[in-house]
Image (tube, rainbow, N blue to C red):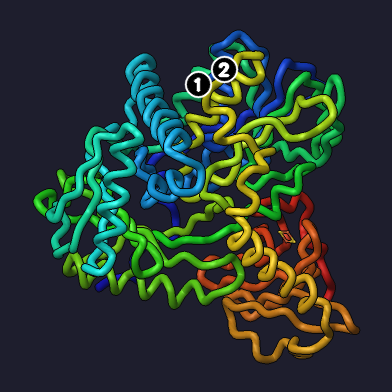
Amino acid sequence: MNTFAAEQRSYWIATAPQGEPYPAPDGDITVDVAVIGAGIAGLSTAWELARSGRGVALLEAGRIACGVTGHTTAKLSALHTLVYERLRRTRGAEAARLYADSQTRALERAAAIVDELGIDCDWEETAAYTYVEDPARTPELRAEAEAAREAGLAADYVTGTGLPFDVAGAVRVTGQAQFHPRKYLLALADDLLRQGARIYENTRVVGLKEGEPCRLTTESGATVTARDVVVATHYPIFDRALLFTRLSPRRELVWAAPVPADLDPQGMFITPEQGTRSVRTAPYEDGRRLLIVTGEHFGPGTADAEARFERLADWAVERFGKLDFAYRWATQDNDSTDSVPLVGPLPTPGRHTYVATGFGGWGLSSSIMAGRLLTDLINGRDSEWSGLYDPRRLGTVVREAPAFLKHQAHVARHFVGDRLPTGWGASTDGIAPGDGAVVLVGGHHWAVHRDDEGELHAVAARCTHLGCLVAFNRAERTWECPCHGSRFDPEGNVVQGPAIRPLEHRDL
Ligand code: FES
């Protein structure tokens, strides 16, 4: 196994470079709708809104489709591991039907857009599988196949897949798709501009004043006035509805290696076993396929990502034979406590602020669905999907209680434990090159990283979101907050929200 030559970058970002950035606003702007965040949720929503005749400004803190969307595995499927049996049990058969319908229509929408705009994005129709290797879990799979079928998907229970190892059972849904997400989204952004929308990159929104109209403030001091605002920042950076109590972030790791075309398992696969394993392939050079394996869920800042990368690589080699890995990267998902995304209006006085979050690893189809749903809601049209995804839903609170309490206990441990002056080193001596640690300096927590040349870099260790202490991820060289998943580079700059302010520099 060769893991040393792997490029530490997402294959999607490496193979779909973007030109010059779209400029930041050079003054104050007024539009119908301001969309914050230009991943697939923000871009899809902005595009649907522009298509419906709305004046739109899309505001992105970094570059478009470079955050979570640029690091996804890019499966477009309505089969979301084991969601249908759970939905049928907890929210009823009609909720499962609406979920299947909304996700299937999202796929159809993406296919229609690819066709209409002539987007070259390696679109491939293929089957999606949820499989298990443990025979004891096959009843779960049979129940999922039945629930998915009842919800309207063409789902079968099968015992054979194209994978080069035996499975005990699998749910198969044909007619799903995989594609290159950045090629798709860069083309969508081009079309968005043609429709008169405005895209601003390197434009971090730091303030939201709700009202009629709403007012956004950017880091550089520009204001954006809009009747409606959509917060599509993955984890919401503005959260008047306390959604952070119902969202738990998790990171997952990805390896990619070229394989001969005849080793392509021909499908998209996921198993809930072994902390989740996901497999797909993509077109690659010289007629080969790129095998992409994903897995090893863990909370940001709570595990040794390097060791987990190794474990995932070992698993891939065990299952697929010798692999020369070309890329590795990591991504982050937010799970909602009831496994259903939160898409719709926030309970704010004017009802002009909307959110799309909690996609739980199925952010592509759910984001495209969110674009359609939010456009309907903002345009005052009814949508039969709105009740299912409504972020204000309360009827599920009791059913969500175990997941809710588990997440709150985890956060509370950090809110309380992080404030104790024990358990933290007082010296930077033990920090190896490439690593980092939180140390106590004069009674304050500092996050200290030693770079490869041995130089130390220090920032305040308290997350600027709600004050938990960050922890160092040496595999990705980031400071990560275990409470809600904010991430920062070694200099303290925000890599991923919900934090919007950097960790303050400290002089050692
Ligand atoms: Fe919420 Fe850090 S992300 S406290």
User: Image check: 499 left or right of 85?
Assistant: right
Residue type pointed to by label 1: Asp
> Where is the N terminus found, in terms of image quarters?
bottom left
Crowding at dot 1, Cα within 10 Å, few <14 / some 14-19 / many 20+, comes out as: few
Q: Tell whether label 1 touches label 2 (CB within 8 Å).
A: yes
Question: Which quarter of the picture shows residue 350?
Answer: top right
Q: Vertical placement of 100 versus 198: above or below?
A: below
Res. 255 in view: no
Q: Which mark is residue 190?
A: 1
Please name whichever residue, 191 or 177, is drawn nearer the observer in this view of the structure. 177
Residue type pointed to by label 2: Leu
Q: Quadrant of ligand 1?
A: bottom right
User: Image check: 381 left or right of 93?
Assistant: right
Q: Vertical placement of 3 versus 359: above or below?
A: below
Crowding at dot 2, Cα within 10 Å, few <14 / some 14-19 / many 20+, comes out as: some
Question: Which quarter of the picture shows residue 133?
Answer: bottom left
Q: Residue at x 45, y 48 (%)?
A: 89
Please name whichever residue, 136 or 496, is drawn nearer the observer in this view of the structure. 136
What is the distance, in whole Å, between disc 2 and disc 1 at their CAs?
5 Å
Q: Vertical placement of 363 versus 459: above or below?
A: above
At mark 1, the secondary structure is helix
Determine which residue is flagged by label 2.
193
Where residue 436 appears, x then y in whole percent? 64, 77
> Where is the C terminus found, in terms of image quarters?
bottom right
At mark 2, the secondary structure is helix
Indicate if the residue with disc 2 has its beta carbon within 8 Å of ligand 1.
Answer: no
Please name whichever residue, 453 or 313, is drawn nearer the observer in this view of the structure. 313
Most distant residue in the left direction: 262
Indicate if the residue with disc 1 has its beta carbon within 8 Å of ligand 1.
Answer: no
